[in-house]
Image (tube, rainbow, N blue to C red):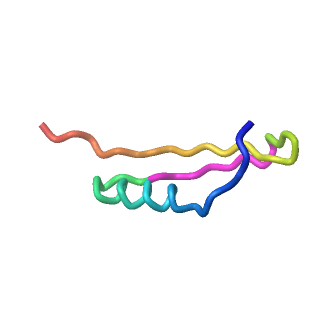
């Protein structure tokens, strides 16, 4: 089971790298899907279309 730990630097770094590629990271949290006091969280990376 995953435990919340760390400083959040990894997500900051991922967002920085995504920004270099003109991409975005979006975070969705579903409060209705709670289990053991935790909520369902989904991360999505949106990438631009490749130019040809």
Residue 46 location, x and y as percent?
Answer: 41, 46
Image vertical order of residue 52 relative to residue 38, above or below: above
- Quadrant for the C terminus, please: top left
| Of 17 and 3, the residue lying toward us | 3
Image vertical order of residue 10 relative to residue 47, above or below: below
Q: Quadrant of residue 42?
A: top right
How many labels were placed on the picture? Answer: 0
Magenta residues, dominant SS class: strand
Give the residue drawn at x 30%, y 46%: 48
Give the residue drawn at x 87%, y 42%: 36
In the displayed structure image, the side of residue 34 where residue 1 appears, left or right: left
Residue 16 location, x and y as percent?
Answer: 38, 61
- Residue bounds of the magenta highlight: 25-32
- Quadrant for the N terminus, please: top right
In the displayed structure image, the side of residue 4 where residue 13 appears, left or right: left
In the displayed structure image, the side of residue 14 where residue 4 appears, left or right: right
Give the residue drawn at x 51%, y 56%: 11
Whether 20 is among the magenta residues is no
Q: Quadrant of residue 14?
A: bottom left
Image vertical order of residue 6 relative to residue 43, above or below: below
Outermost residue on the front side: it is 6
């Amino acid at each position: 089971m995953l435990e919340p730990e760390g400083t959040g630097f990894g997500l900051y770094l991922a967002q920085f790298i995504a920004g270099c590629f003109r991409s975005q990271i979006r975070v969705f949290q579903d409060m209705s899907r709670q289990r053991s006091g935790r909520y369902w969280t989904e991360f999505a990376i949106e990438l631009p279309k490749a130019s040809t």
